[in-house]
Amino acid sequence: MLDNKATADALPTLLIGASIISQQKLVEAMNTAKNLNVPLARAVLMLNLVGESTLKIVLEADELVRSKAATVDLALK
């Protein structure tokens, strides 16, 4: 079972685990999100790191992990 930290960190883990963005780009997006006070997903889009359709799929997987309907490993498949 996932702990709360693993569940809360699902979006970054999914983005990196699926090789959608690099660790460096994730850090850039996280800094942008923090500085602009916007969600990480919005920062990823603002920086043009992923397209909307890809982000939608990742966010759906993120929701499955957050609701504990799937593990991160399963969501990555």
Image: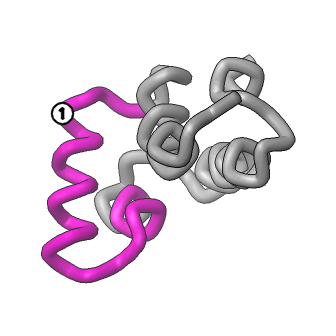
The magenta stretch is 21-44
Front residue of this view, candidates 61 and 65: 65
Magenta stretch, main secondary structure, is helix
Placement of 75 over or under 59, stated as above or below: above
Residue under label 1:
24
Please say whether residue 30 is one of the residues in the magenta stretch: yes
**For residue 55, above or below residue 3:** below
**36 to 45, vertically: above or below:** below
- Tell me which residue sits at (75%, 18%) in the image: 77
Left or right: residue 57 compared with residue 24:
right
Kind of residue indicated by mark 1: Gln
- Of all residues, the one furthest to the bottom in this rendering is 37
User: Image check: 76 left or right of 51?
Assistant: right
Identity of the residue drawn at 80% across and 34% down: 70
Residue 4 percent across, percent down from the top left? 53, 47
Q: Is residue 33 left or right of residue 76?
A: left
Residue at 48% in and 30% down: 20
Query: Which part of the image, by quadrant, shows the N terminus?
Result: top right
Q: Where's residue 52, x and y in %?
A: 60, 58
Q: Position of residue 72 (x, y in %)?
A: 64, 28
Magenta-drawn stretch contains 40:
yes
Give the total of numbered labels. 1
